[in-house]
């Protein structure tokens, strides 16, 4: 699996390269600024990009801007944002096309290598991997008058855990319910959000995107 990595801190960048290579990822490019990131993404068309938000030259939002431009030119390009900051406007724009293959993790809340590697693989496979703190920022606005307002509190809770990338088994363990109960809740979510029957994996992504874009 080929990865383009963008991180301006040299030690962290080299650490991420070593970590990913130790888990059988191929590093197509590891860059430290926005213009180089965009070029690397368009030149290499990687299986997934791991991108910091604030990169040189201005240390504002170059990483996200490069990722957005790359996804405009390569629709559906998988992008995992790894940052200290939640940039709500650009995060919403990343989610807006509804194609999935998006993740957003906060550096100080990634607690172990396995969690990070799992998120990279999940995004590369077309899924989502969202930090709960990012989710809470993005969904601060209300849902009245939207399909999401049809969900029960428990269904909303299940959907929030889906947005974090958790499987039905993991959701069941977290909520202390049976996996069968979670399956029933997810089926209700798909129905209430008017999602077509195209396969549960795809509907999970569509449901999560509906939730995060509210």
Image (tube, helix red, strand yellow):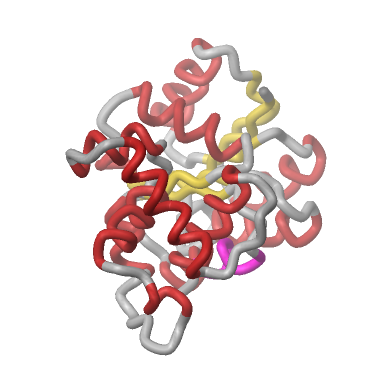
Q: Is residue 196 above or below residue 193?
A: above
Instruction: Please state, as top left, top right, bottom left or bottom right, where the N terminus lies in the image.
Output: top right
Position of 182 relative to 140 (above/below): above
Is residue 130 inside the magenta stretch?
no
| Residue 169 in picture, x, y percent from top left | 35, 32
Q: Nearer the viewer, residue 184 or 9?
A: 184
Pinpoint residue 211: horizontal percent, then vertical percent.
44, 66
The residue lying toward the viewer, choosing from 47 and 144, is 144
Rendered view: 28 above or below 172: above
The stretch of residues the image draws in magenta is 92-97
- Quadrant the C terminus occupies: bottom left
Q: Position of residue 24 (x, y in %)?
A: 58, 12
Name the foreground residue: 143 vs 39: 143
Left or right of residue 190: residue 137:
left
Asked where in the image residue 87 lies, by quadrant, the reply is bottom left
Q: Tell how many labels.
A: 0
Q: Which quadrant holds residue 177?
A: top left
**In percent of the image, x 62 and y 42: which residue is there?**
126
In this rendered view, identify the residue nearer to me: 196 or 137. Answer: 196
Q: Residue at x 34, y 56 (%)?
A: 160
Image location of residue 210, percent across then percent down:
51, 67
The residue sitting at the bottom extreme is 145
Name which residue lies at 80% across and 57% down: 73
């Amino acid at each position: 699996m080929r990865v383009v990595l963008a991180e301006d801190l040299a030690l962290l960048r080299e650490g991420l390269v070593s970590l990913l290579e130790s888990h059988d990822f191929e590093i197509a490019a590891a860059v430290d600024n926005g213009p180089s990131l965009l070029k690397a993404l368009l030149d290499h068309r990687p299986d997934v990009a791991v991108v910091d938000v604030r990169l040189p030259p201005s240390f504002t939002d170059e990483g996200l801007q490069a990722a957005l431009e790359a996804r405009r030119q390569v629709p559906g390009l998988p992008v995992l944002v790894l940052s200290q900051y939640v940039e709500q406007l650009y995060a919403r724009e990343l989610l807006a096309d509804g194609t999935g293959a998006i993740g957003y993790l906060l550096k100080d809340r990634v607690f172990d290598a396995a969690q990070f590697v799992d998120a990279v693989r999940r995004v590369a496979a077309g899924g989502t991997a969202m930090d709960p703190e990012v989710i809470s920022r993005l969904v601060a606005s209300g849902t009245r008058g939207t399909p999401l307002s049809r969900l029960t509190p428990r269904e909303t809770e299940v959907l929030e855990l889906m947005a974090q990338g958790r499987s039905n088994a993991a959701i069941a363990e977290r909520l202390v319910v049976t996996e069968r109960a979670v399956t029933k809740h997810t089926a209700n979510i798909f129905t209430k959000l008017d999602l077509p029957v195209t396969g549960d994996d795809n509907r999970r992504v569509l449901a999560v995107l509906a939730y995060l874009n509210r």
